[in-house]
Amino acid sequence: ETMSWKEECMGPPSCLIQRLDHLVLTVKSTEGTVFFYSKVLGTEVVTFEGNHRALHFGNQKFNLHEAGREYEPRSRCPVPGSADICLVT
């Protein structure tokens, strides 16, 4: 017996999100942030295309965007202390 679209939609939704890809932190100072996270918290600092910085720990990655010097893709109104999450679907 086939279900109507309405009956199919009444069940629990299947999750389209597979995992977190990375987090983007908008920071006041890239150098200050790199110092704190690497020296105090022990994260690995990675430099990638265009001299951009990221913090790695475990399977996680935080990309750093310095306020006023963000690169694409970026949030619409980035301010220091804000974060964006990037999901894999």
Image: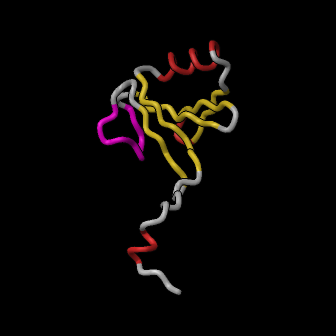
Position in image of residue 38 (x %, y %): 63, 19
Where is residue 53 shown, x and y percent of the image? 55, 32
Residue furthest to the top = 40
Q: Residue at x 53, y 57 (%)?
A: 15
Q: Give residue 34's quadrant in the image.
A: top right
The magenta span reads: 69-78
Q: Which residue shows up at 46% across the image and 73% down it? A: 8
Measuring from the top left, give residue 33's x and y in whole percent.
Answer: 51, 20
Residue lying at 42% horizontally and 29% vertically, measured from the top left: 26
Secondary structure mostly seen in magenta is: loop
Q: How many numbered circles are shown?
A: 0
In the displayed structure image, the side of residue 57 where residue 81 appears, left or right: left
**In the image, residue 89 lies at what x, y percent?**
53, 57
Query: Is 7 left or right of 37, judged from the image as shown?
Result: left
| 46 in relation to 1, above or below | above
Residue 46, located in which quarter of the rendered image? top right
Magenta run includes residue 77: yes
Q: Can residue 14 be found in the magenta stretch?
A: no
Q: Residue furthest right?
A: 58
Q: Residue furthest front?
A: 1
Q: How is the model colour-coded?
A: secondary structure
Q: Looking at the picture, tell me which residue is in the foreground, 78 or 29.
A: 78
- Name the outermost residue toward the left: 77
Which residue occupies 31% across, 42% down?
76
In the depicted structure, whether residue 24 falls above or below residue 87: above
Q: Who is closer to the viewer here, 59 or 65?
A: 59
